[in-house]
Image (cartoon, rainbow, N blue to C red):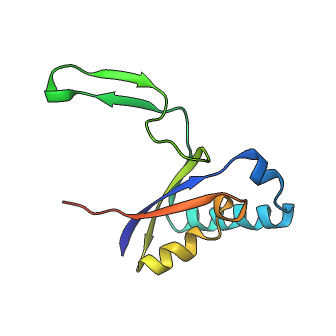
Amino acid sequence: MTTFIAIGYGDSAGYDKTDQQIRDAAHEHDARLRQRGAIMGIAGAPIQVRNHDGDRVVTTDGPFLRSELPIAGFTVIEADTVEEAVSLASKTPCAVAHGVVEVWPLQTT
């Protein structure tokens, strides 16, 4: 198994215009992912952290990344292949409710 990080982007406008049955099915899918061990959460307010040259920690409120849609949440999933991870991500609320999900293989050193 490989670990994948899924980053979901979406907003209320896209979510609200999606049929309720499709949203419900996506939330049920999320519940099944949690049952199989996925770690999932809604994105809170980010804090940027810098410690250039190990000299001094500086923090700044707010995201560093910018995108058309706000980051809505994160999931850590296990899958045998990237294709399986994509299939799992494709049924989540951000993917079906006019958002987007990025799937990143987590590479360990």
Residue sitting nearer the eye, 24 or 12: 12
Q: Which quarter of the rendered picture does the C terminus lie within? A: bottom left
**Position of 19 compared to 6: left or right?**
right
| Residue drawn 60% across the image and 44% down it | 70
Determine the residue positioned at 41% across, 80% down: 81
Q: Quadrant of the N terminus?
A: bottom left
Locate residue 87, reporting x and y percent: 56, 76
Expressed as whole percent of the image width and height from the top left, the position of residue 27 reads 71, 61
Marker count (numbered): 0
Q: Is residue 60 above or below residue 92?
A: above
Residue at 48% x, 33% y: name it: 46
Q: Where is residue 98, by image quadrant?
A: bottom right
4 left or right, relative to 107: right
Q: Quadrant of residue 88?
A: bottom right
| Image spot of residue 30 (x, y percent) | 63, 62
Spot occupied by residue 73 in the image (x, y as percentages of width and height):
56, 49
Q: Please tell me whether residue 85 is drawn above or below residue 61 in the rendered image.
A: below
Horizontally, residue 92 falls left or right of residue 44, namely right
* Closer to us: 53 or 34: 53
